Amino acid sequence: MALRGVEKSYGAVPVLRGVELELDRGEVYAFLGRNGAGKSTTLRVVMGITRPDAGELWLFGERVAPGDTRPRRRIGYVAQEQHFYGWMTPESLGDFVGAFYPTWKRPEYERLLRSLDVPSRKVSTLSGGTRVKLALALALAHDPELLVFDEPTAGLDPVARHEFVEIVRDLATEGRRTLLFSSHLIDEVERISTRVGILEQGQVRYQGELGKLRERSRRLRLPAPDAEQFVELQRQLARLELQVLAQHQAKGELELTLWSVQPAKLAALSELLPAARFELLSLEESFVALVRSGLALTMSAALDAGVVHGMPVVAPA
Amino acid sequence: MIVHQLRLWQKELRQQRWSLLVAALFLALLGLIAWHAYETSGTATTRMTVISETLGVFVPLFALTQAHYSVVREYRQQTQLFVEALPLRRWEFPLAKLSWGLLTQGMLAGGLCLWVTQLADDTPARFLAITCTRTLAFVAVCWSVAFALAMLGRLRWLAGVTLWVGCYLLSKRGVELGRFGPFALLDKLSFPFERESFPVRALLQSGAVTAAALLLGLGLPLLHEGSVTERLARPASAGEKTGFWAVLLAQGALVYLLPREQRREPFSFTGAGVLASEQRNVQVRCEDAAFEPKAREVLAELEQLSSRLTTELHVAEPPALRVTLRHTGGIRVVSGQPGEGLLLELNLQWATPALVAFLAAGHSFNQLSAGRASFEPNRWFSNGFARYWAPTNDRAAIDQYWLDALLVRRRVPFDEQLLSQWERLAELAGEDVATSIALTLVEVVEQRFGREQLLQLARALLVRPTIRNGFDWLVAERADFPAALERATGESWAAFIAAYQLQLDAAAVRLAQPLAALPTLSATLGVEHTEVGSNLVADLSGLAPDSARECLFRHAPLPPYDLAVPSDTVQDASLPWSAGVASFTGRVRGRYQSGQRAFAAIDCPLPGLARYLRLDARRLDIP
């Protein structure tokens, strides 16, 4: 699956601005991003529900023409909210949905319902978690090659979310299907995905492995410098090509969140600032700092080349 | 695509199966009611009226209901988002809903149509095709409009009411919506009877409305990838609700403030045989050139009437008068809104110019006063004044009416109460003779208070339009003639009636000779109980006629609460009085059940009298 230069606006509001994305078969890819970053729109473009203003969508090795619904038969989709017909039962819902998929397998669907513990009663009486499981059964019963999940666990309680993540992780480990999903829950992404894309304001800000995101960021704490020391600190950070994602000063201590951190740079900085303490950030802290900073980190290659522009270190008053 | 449509129809069928069942039962109920109305009306001539009567109610109601269940609920519950994620093109889903509605409504309406046409006596294939085309086109236009309104989500009520108000205002501005497209398709006058011509114009207009509605209904869910419909389907905010109410109130005010009645130009006769007045808005058409001299007399009479309405009663724009004179038939009057004119169809074999003038004046008063003139306590003044004032009456003609009054007084004692109750008087004397009595009362008014006072009363009671509000109903309409007379002249009703009795006595002396020449006939009405039921019985006696006399036994079931007997419920049974027979008994057998109450009257013609004389009239309890 590939998206090339996909753009989409709702009226005058640009939602996607040249989204580039490429997934290999069997890959588990997660979109991270804030609400309104464009995650759902990207997935809707993949599903063919939303038509992009510009750009290309490639699925299963072919470019998808606008309005072509055939590729959708090979995709399983779980939406953010489950708007099922409340008067239907899971079985009748399966009959309705299955009629649109040539590869639908009713026995498989029934097996999925049993294994996911979806009871046979009106959909309107099912809990939110069970509805998500039902959506998963509907998405899997026609044996799709690509699974697209749009924040399926949003609004679920922790137990239901945990159950769902476990099921998806099992699917991911099978390696038969490509899985593209969006979430703003870091731990969920961390448990399932092999690769992540961070989407912010309709652009992919980071694309790569989740572990690298954590490795490249550090929190630096040191006693608050005076003006001369601060100028020197700025000069040294620039020389080492370290970017500052965030800075905070309180109780006589300066706290900097650094990006583009590599072991060699870290060692050099430790020598220069012996009083400094370095802390490893959690994934969530790294994600938040990166998203807030407004950095345009397009590819991991660019990251390695250091082609990034961080916010300047502001001198303390 | 067809497979997808079938799958989506299957879903709609499962979703709406109960509402469809209820709709089918509702249709059957409406059909039965219309059928019963047809069977019992006595005036309907074809069963095809059942179709138009039933579908005129059912189709719009069902279209709105189905649009709510099928479209509004779908988008409000956002279940369309679920369907949109299936491998379907976006337009397939709304199209399936549209076609499903057309299919179900077309089947129900078409089914009724076919069923009734099968039961109708004579339904050739062309007539059947015309009827089915009208029905299906009506279904299409109703459903497409309901579908488009449903797609407007929370704005649908506002749009629907605005549409309705727009139609109402247009009709008030003189646009005849009844002849426009969808309304004309089920037109009660043409739907059951038009066997040859397809209503091409109505079909084209309906097609245009349908196309416009479809453009909106199918376009909205496709616009901006359904986001517009999605947003419209959300419940209205408090601010929006306030706005809606403001718009609705503004529309209500508009409806209230705009002139209620829109005058339409009176039509004009075309073709040969039409005589038109140059000065007044009067036309007379006669079917036969042989009638032309009489038609000219009628024209002159009506010209004079129209002129006097202006000069004497100060009516600036008297109604346009149109009269058709025929060889056959009776009297038919078509009266429109004020200013729209009158059409009278008359059989000139027996209708005199004086009668035409009387009828034209009476209906003109009714039209000009918007019904005030026919309000019951004023009715005798309206009738009497029309007969006295409108035609050119000479003394001999007026004495004929005095003769009528004297003959009635022989049987029914006149008092102030009876003479103030028109309906009671008309029941006892017969409406035509009661009008004669009214004429004599009007003449006495003129004799006692002068011509100008009489005309002032007529201006106040007969040509001043009612204003149709609560005050008018409570005060103005209740200002009946006795009260109006006392207010205008200072003379009480009792004193006036006493003076009238004196005039009657004087007339009895003046007309003693013709009165004595008239045979004295009498009748006694009663009820006869037999083993097989009750009969109305009339014992008639009097001077044996030289030739057979065709009397009438008139009877009707009495309405409850002692209301007046509606004239259209009275049935006439022939009661021939054979030559040389001095007395005989007539019967109406088995028409009334025990416990019922009936009105009965005997009317007989008398030589030398222009009208039937009522010999007896009673309200009878059937034991």
Image (tube, coloured by chain):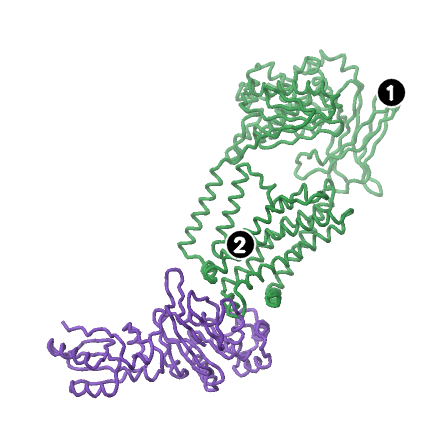
Chain colours: A purple, B green
What element does badge 2 sit on?
Answer: helix
Residue occupying image coordinates x 66% and y 15%: B503
**Chain ID for label 1?**
B
Instruction: Check the image and name the residue furthest to the right.
Output: B580
What element does badge 1 sit on?
Answer: loop
Which residue is tagged 1? B546
Residue B456 at x, y percent in the picture? 54, 20
**Chain ID for label 2?**
B
Image quarter for residue B560?
Answer: top right
Q: Amino acid at mark 2?
A: Leu
Residue B274 at x, y percent in the picture? 67, 24
Circle 2 Cα neighbour tier, 10 Å, few/some/many (<14 / 14–19 / ≥20): few
Question: Looking at the image, is mark 1 or mark 2 earlier in the sequence?
Answer: 2
Image quarter for residue A283?
Answer: bottom left
Query: Nearest the camera: B381 or A305?
Result: A305
Image side of residue B213 versus residue A282, left or right: right
